Amino acid sequence: MNRLFAYFIVGAMLLGVVVGWICNATLTPDQITSVAGGLGILTDLFLRLIKMIIAPLVFATLVSGIAHMEDAAQIGRVGVKTMGWFICASLVSLTIGLIMVHIIQPGVGMNLAIPAGDAAATVDTAKFTLKEFVTHLVPTSIIDAMARNEIIQIVVFSVLVGTAVSAVDDRAPQVLQLVEQITAIMLKVTGYVMKLAPIAIFAALASTVATQGVGVLLTYAKFVGGFYLSMGILWAVLIAACAVFVGARALKLIGVIRTPALLAFSTASSEAAYPRTLEVLQKFGVSRRIVSFVLPLGYSFNLDGSMMYCTFATLFIAQVYGIELSIGQQITMLLLLMVTSKGMAGVPRASLVVISATLSYFKLPEAGLLLVLAVDHLLDMGRSATNVVGNSVASVVVAKWEKQLGPEEEETVTA
């Protein structure tokens, strides 16, 4: 099904480029504007559907995830070390994405006009004073925050509720069950919405190529190439960090996790590679106790590739529309993405939902989401493989810290 959907995505991209090129070559500027306006109806509907699911999805996934974290806290020392590594890895991946998008500048020169509905989408620096930021963290009403998709307020409320649920003696089983059911329902809704992605991709690309010409495709090539280069740097940093703690065995780890990483890449799903990753890490010498704890937790709190993508894509969209973000705003974005990306774990096309929420918070044109949506599946393959690498490194390092990293099994070395 994933492969068939990928074909639909590619077909929609190609059809959108062809239709856009024909319109650009044959129609008058007024006619092009009219066609782009008609296509805009499809893209607007898709964006509204994405915005519709943000608030309940963030709330349900965060509360559910944090409520279960008490199990990890019982393990004590291992839990603290694991979460410490996850936080450091998250900051590194987000920062690399931030630095690389500024060096490569894939969106600079595209100079898209801010859509009419986003005419006010210029970032108000005054809003990001320390006082305004701190007071804005806490909602006066969670209903109002959800209605306005105030993502950071929803996150604060969700963290408090999840912590409270985990602190209750019996963990409020009925409440927890309700939240988990909401999560399951919203995942289904997200799946339904994403089935419309090929239509939105066709409309977005046809409109963009019609108004900008085929030269805009060079921007996509620069965006995709720049992101894969950034992921290559992240891989090198992760392996180097692993080598600091486990020595030359870090290089052997690359060969060991090759199969699950390729599986994640080909299916664009790091979850699909979970069983194989669990198996090869135990053969590498990581104790079952460690890998059975670190790996599942990593799939919720250590999505290095996805977090880098959120930073890279959000700033790419800002560059496309010629919107400058201050250093303070970019640091705020890193902190926001660090929290929201963990709340989105396990959600199909989770990065798109996180990016949409970030665009809304920073008053960036939400139509920019459609620019990255066109190549999202291609990039999802790379970031899924990166998630596998990040979680494998975390498991090995934590096992080394706990003196539970044994010798490799011979069959792993020769595999």
Image: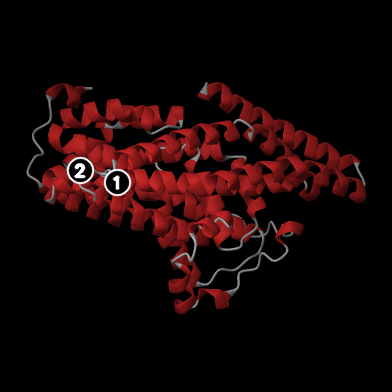
**C-alpha distance separating marks 1 and 2:** 9 Å
Element at label 1: helix
| Coordinates of residue 146 in the picture (x, y in percent) | 53, 54
Q: Is residue 303 visible?
A: no
Q: What crowding class fits label 2: few (fewer than 14 Cα within 10 Å), some (14-19), or many (20 or more)?
A: few
Type of residue at label 2? Answer: Asp
Q: Is residue 36 visible?
A: yes
Residue receiving disc 1: 67
In this rendered view, identify the residue nearer to me: 74 or 404.
74
Q: What crowding class fits label 1: few (fewer than 14 Cα within 10 Å), some (14-19), or many (20 or more)?
A: many
Q: Residue at x 12, y 26 (%)?
A: 409
Element at label 2: helix
What label does residue 71 carry, if any? Answer: 2
Type of residue at label 1? Answer: Ala
| Coordinates of residue 192 in the picture (x, y in percent) | 58, 31
| Image-based side of 139 in relation to 43, left or right | left
Q: Residue at x 66, y 41 (%)?
A: 46
Q: Residue at x 25, y 44 (%)?
A: 171
Q: Is residue 206 above or below residue 114?
A: above
| Image-based side of 77 in relation to 387, left or right | left
What label does residue 22 carry, if any? Answer: none
